Image (spheres, rainbow, N blue to C red):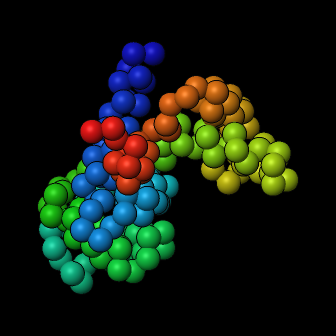
């Protein structure tokens, strides 16, 4: 139990670091979060090599395609540049989307279940999880919704406007 808890914390920290490092300079935190989620969905659970500014390489092109699909061409170039600058020439572990964005997925499942005609089976298929896992996410989403806290890693623009400083 302790080992899996530590892994979830590490996965959350890596996802947060990626989002925070990609946001800014023309990229909103919402766009950065969509891009990092797409990376976790596509490469989740494996080590990937991040090239160090190799423009024509297959690794860079694959990353660019995944990012462009979720964030758009312009944002994908800026995000890829930031990722290459920070992690270029290294292999990094990309966590699974369902572990790195656990609370966000839980809130999405809670919001969507039954409201737009989505069944639990449909949501489980969409998020590539089991029915039991989808139901557990729904319960987590319900408890998070009842709690008066913001979801995991809210968009930076929202927190800056709500800061009483």
Quarter of the image for residue 81 reads bottom left
Outermost residue, top side: 1
Q: Position of residue 120 (x, y in %)?
A: 78, 42
Q: Is residue 14 above or below residue 41?
A: above
Outermost residue, front side: 164
Q: Residue at x 42, y 63 (%)?
A: 31
**Relative to residue 137, is residue 77 drawn left or right?**
left
Q: If the image is split into quadrants, where does the C terminus sit?
A: top left
Q: Is residue 4 visible?
A: yes
Q: Position of residue 141 (x, y in %)?
A: 63, 34
**Relative to residue 49, is residue 117 drawn left or right?**
right
**Relative to residue 101, is residue 162 drawn left or right?**
left
Quarter of the image for residue 4 reads top left
- Between residue 88 and residue 69, name the one nearer to us: 69
Q: Is residue 136 visible?
A: no
Q: Position of residue 39 (x, y in %)?
A: 41, 59
Q: Position of residue 63 (x, y in %)?
A: 35, 69
Q: Residue at x 61, y 38 (%)?
A: 106
- Between residue 89 and residue 18, name the one nearer to us: 18
Q: Is residue 108 above or below residue 132?
A: below
**Relative to residue 136, is residue 53 drawn left or right?**
left
Q: If the image is split into quadrants, where does the N terminus sit?
A: top left
- Between residue 90 and residue 136, name the one nearer to us: 136
Q: Residue at x 38, y 38 (%)?
A: 12
Q: Is residue 59 above or below residue 35?
A: below
Outermost residue, bottom side: 56
Q: Residue at x 17, y 77 (%)?
A: 54
Quarter of the image for residue 109 reads top right
Tally of numbered discs: 0
């Amino acid at each position: 139990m302790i080992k899996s808890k530590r892994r979830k914390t590490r996965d959350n920290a890596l996802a947060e670091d990626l989002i925070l490092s990609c946001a800014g300079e023309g990229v909103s935190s919402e766009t950065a979060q969509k891009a990092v989620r797409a990376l976790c969905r596509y490469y989740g659970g494996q080590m990937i090599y991040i090239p160090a500014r190799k423009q024509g390489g297959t690794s860079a092109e694959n990353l660019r395609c995944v990012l462009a699909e979720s964030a758009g061409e312009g944002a994908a170039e800026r995000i890829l540049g930031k990722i290459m600058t920070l992690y270029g020439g290294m292999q990094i572990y990309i966590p699974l989307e369902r572990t790195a964005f656990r609370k966000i997925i839980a809130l999405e499942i809670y919001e969507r279940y039954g409201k737009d005609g989505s069944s639990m089976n449909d949501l489980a298929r969409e998020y590539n999880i089991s029915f039991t896992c989808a139901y557990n996410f729904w319960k987590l989403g319900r408890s998070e919704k009842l709690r008066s806290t913001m979801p995991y890693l809210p968009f930076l623009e929202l927190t800056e406007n709500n800061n009483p400083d």
